[in-house]
Image (spheres, rainbow, N blue to C red):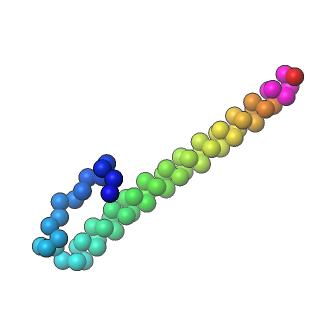
Amino acid sequence: QSKFEPQPTINPINQPVSVLLKEQNEQKKKKNQVVQTIDAVREVLVGLLDDQKQQYQMTTATAT
């Protein structure tokens, strides 16, 4: 478990299994949304970096 995640204060003994599973599913969904967001941002940044590389190569090619 990462230290950034607030852990839900659940007493497993008093909770039925279905509630525990529901909690776990909710946490997984939240994680997946975060992961998808990070992946999307990464794609955009990689695309921008590629554009900059191409522009740099063009300017160095025309300068010489």
Which residue lies at the image location 69% right of the left edge and 40% below the top edge? 50
Magenta segment includes 54: no
Magenta region, residue range: 59-63
Q: Residue at x 75, y 32 (%)?
A: 55
> Residue 60, relative to residue 33: is it above or below?
above
- Asked if residue 63 lies left or right of residue 36, the reply is right
Looking at the image, is 43 positioned above or below residue 19?
above
Q: Is residue 32 left or right of residue 13?
A: right
Q: Taking 26 as reference, is 2 above or below it?
A: above
Most prominent secondary structure in the magenta stretch?
helix
Outermost residue, bottom side: 17
Quarter in which the N terminus is drawn: bottom left
Q: Position of residue 4 (x, y in %)?
A: 31, 48
Q: 1 or 61, which is in the foreground?
A: 1
Quarter holding the C terminus is: top right
Tell me where residue 40 appears, x and y as whole percent: 54, 51
Question: Height in image: 40 above or below 8?
Answer: above
Residue lying furthest left in this view? 14
Q: Residue 25: x and y, percent?
A: 34, 68
Q: Locate residue 33 relative to residue 22 in the image: left or right.
A: right
Q: Quadrant of residue 33?
A: bottom left
Residue 46 placement: quadrant:
top right
* Residue occupying image coordinates x 59% and y 48%: 43
- Asked if residue 61 lies in the magenta stretch, the reply is yes
